[in-house]
Image (tube, rainbow, N blue to C red):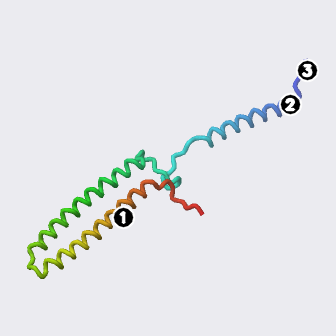
Amino acid sequence: MQHARPNRLRRAVAFVVLAALLGLVSLTLSQCTMVGDNLTGVGVSGVGPTSCVKQCNDLYSVLYNIEQKRHATDVEACQNLPQPYKADCLASEDARHTAAQTQLGNGKIDCQNNCHRQGSGSAG
């Protein structure tokens, strides 16, 4: 019977140790790590774009209804003014109401567009 040469034994032990170390390192580095939303730009809240758009629609529906009530109240107040001031008041209220509706419309569109942002980076 011939004994294993010490050189072969050392080489086999070194190979086993190296394989075990490589296995341990690969297991350690392959584990999932939670990162913040800021890193990926994608939220993990589970709220998708559809529910975000619904929230925008609901919010701006309420704001639109408030504006409509304010407009009706202001028009009624203008109706109670004497004739020379009534026309100016109604014209002024109509301009204010139109501007408010435009602002609400733009705000709703911005809100909905922000629902679809997937990342915070820029391409270019």
Q: Which of the 4 quarters of the picture holds residue 89?
A: bottom left
Q: Which residue does the numbered mark 3 point to in the structure image?
A: 2
Residue 10: give x, y in percent of width and height. Answer: 82, 33
Mark 1 neighbour density, 10 Å: few (under 14) some (14–19) many (20 or more)? few
Q: Which residue does the numbered mark 2 point to in the structure image?
A: 8
74 left or right, relative to 49: left
Mark 3 neighbour density, 10 Å: few (under 14) some (14–19) many (20 or more)? few
Residue 104: give x, y in percent of width and height. Answer: 31, 64
First-in-chain label (2 vs 1): 2
Q: Nearer the viewer, mark 3 or mark 1?
A: 1
Please name the residue shown 78% across and 34% down the image: 15
23 left or right, relative to 8: left
**Which residue, as the protein is rendered here, is positioned at the far right?**
2
**Real-space CA distance between mark 2 and mark 1, rounded to the nearest whole angstrom:** 77 Å
Q: Which residue does the numbered mark 1 point to in the structure image?
A: 106
Please name the residue shown 70% across and 38% down the image: 22
First-in-chain label (3 vs 1): 3
First-in-chain label (3 vs 2): 3
Placement of 53 over or under 106, stated as above or below: above
